[in-house]
Image: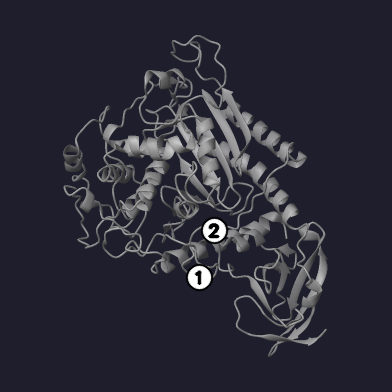
Amino acid sequence: MSRTLALSTALLLLSAHLILCAEALRVPIVTDQQRAVPPTKPSSQRGTTHGNAPPLGDPSYCTFPTPTYSLQLPNPLPVALQEALQRADQRAAALFAQNGTAGMHVSVVYNQQVLFSRGYGQVHMDSSSAASSVAPPSPPPDADTIFRVGSLTKLFTVLMLLHLRDHHRVSLETELKSLLPNYHTPNPWQTDRGITLRMLASHTSGMTRMIQCDSPCNYTDSQMLEYIATFPLLFPPDTYAHYSDAAFALLARALQSVTPLSMEDYIRENILTPLGMNSTGFDFTEAVKARMATGYNVEDPNNPIPVVKGEPNLGWMSGSAQMYSSPADLQKLVSFFCRYDRAAGYGQPLDGVTLREFFSPQFVNTDASNFDGYGLAWEFLTGVPGLGSLPFLSKNGGDGAEFGFDAQLQWAVRQKLGVIVLLSEAPSTLELDVTNAVLSEVFPVIDDLYFAHALQNSLPDQYTNLLGTFQGADITVDVTVEVMPYYNNTEQLKISYNHGEVEYALLTSAINGDTFRFCRLAPLGPISCERMEGGVGSDVNEYVRFTLDDNELAVSLRLPNSNLIYNRVKQ
């Protein structure tokens, strides 16, 4: 099976998984009461629960779990990966030359390792290209150049929410009105459902997308809540998803009400400082402006207009899109994302379970409009050109021409691969085009390197004790060893049976001495084995379980998703 055909299965698997999550999350794993959080209304049927991850077969397992598909790369990098990064660089440069105007920086981070970091264009355009007081020539942006990152701010607002929740200050199901008693938005549907912090963070509150506010937007809570009350809900809460900057502004102000710190200071002290992100923040000081690229309004590409640094000042709306950062700092953020298998502490502001929750779906767009689904600030995307229907988490930071900047962060959770593109011009789609181009070059090579490594020693110890023929009521199962060209010409334990001509091939070693994880094989090769092992889709439980006697000889087996026992009939 070709890679494109193999990966096309992932969209169906992703849809099945997301829909299963939307239904299965009625059952909590760890309740707010167990976390010593004051009781709130019953939790939403959407979203994800929090706590110790259940076994891979539990219907409430709706996070993106370990095991991951990442490895420690050697130095120097494998030749195939070096060549892929060169192609990615060439494609990024070509796209910028064709569609770019000002400056761009591209980063690739894999398993906490920065594989690629390069700038294109100019930090400041010379006076012959735009009205600028900065004298030419100007170099390309580097990893320390500061960009405005727009709606990437929403990621930090959610990290604040999760940090407060983990420290028992709020629940994701805490109602907005309990934190901001003066909040009121007309609800034409007259539903009893209150808006929760989870709904605000996952774009399911029903709130309007944007509310206009002069710069600087320095109004009081009372003034802004009175203004917001003029915008009725677009749909009943928690019934649909609609991207909302207003919801994140409210979320940030609600979170600020439970801490003596401002939202900006809380994020700096509890998220940015532990991660060493010292070039990221909200306040555009003179020192920040001195390191900042000039942003440009390129509504007319032939007449780029420089934007005043730090403008517009979102003030009360800061939790939606106010922040700035540098490529080096965002590389640290993605490296933090890679550590979702670690406990909190030692520079880890959130533990791995919380991070996996952060990466998990909250709402499925069944009409397939706009995004495939929403998470906590994230959009779930499939269909990256050249990668079939592989799922990625995405966050775009393009907030309009008046900001003069665009940003894109794309994150492949299980592979621990992130791509960051920052632009000093807006509006543009260049950041997404470059991200897709880079991913389509790098991701397949990373994928191949992992599986080539993982399959080198794939046969389990004493595997000969498992070989033989096993008989069920009407099916005969054969366990053999075969050289598999689709697995790097390595020997694989193969299970085949005569019901629908379905076959299984071993991908990992034993789990509990008698249990093995297998990938389904089609006549032409593996069908997205990695995603099945990673926990996405209806085939999450692709296990074959053997019963062993005292001599560790397999006397029977049970196939995946089946309670039927097949007994050994010959050796």
Between 226 and 47, the one lying in front of the other is 47
Q: Quadrant of the C terminus?
A: bottom right
Q: How many marks?
A: 2
> Is residue 426 left or right of 118 when viewed as pictured?
left
- Of labels 1 and 2, earlier in sequence is 1
Q: Which amino acid type corresponds to the residue marked 2 in the rendered image?
A: Pro
Q: CA distance from mark 1 to mark 2?
A: 12 Å
| Residue 556, placed above or below residue 376 | below
Q: Position of residue 487 (x, y in %)?
A: 77, 59
Against 495, is 114 above or below?
A: above
Q: Quadrant of residue 282?
A: top left
Left or right: residue 557 compared with residue 207: right
Horizontal and vertical percent position of residue 44 = 33, 63
User: Looking at the rendering, in which quadrant would you find the N terminus?
Assistant: bottom right
**Above or below 57: residue 295:** above
Rendered image quadrant of residue 303: top left
Which SS class for mark 2?
A: loop
- Please identify the residue farthest to the bottom as the structure is shown: 473
Q: Where is mark 2, residue-wise?
A: 65
Q: Circle 1 sits on which residue?
A: 58
410 relative to 527 in the view: left or right: left
Q: What secondary structure is found at the residue carrying circle 1?
A: loop
Give residue 355's position: percent from left, percent from top: 47, 51
The answer to whether residue 204 shows anywhere in this view is no
Quarter of the rendering containing residue 287: top left
Could one spot residue 183 in this view of the protein?
yes
Tell me the residue at 63%/29% (across/down). 93
**Residue 125 percent location from the top left of the image:** 50, 16
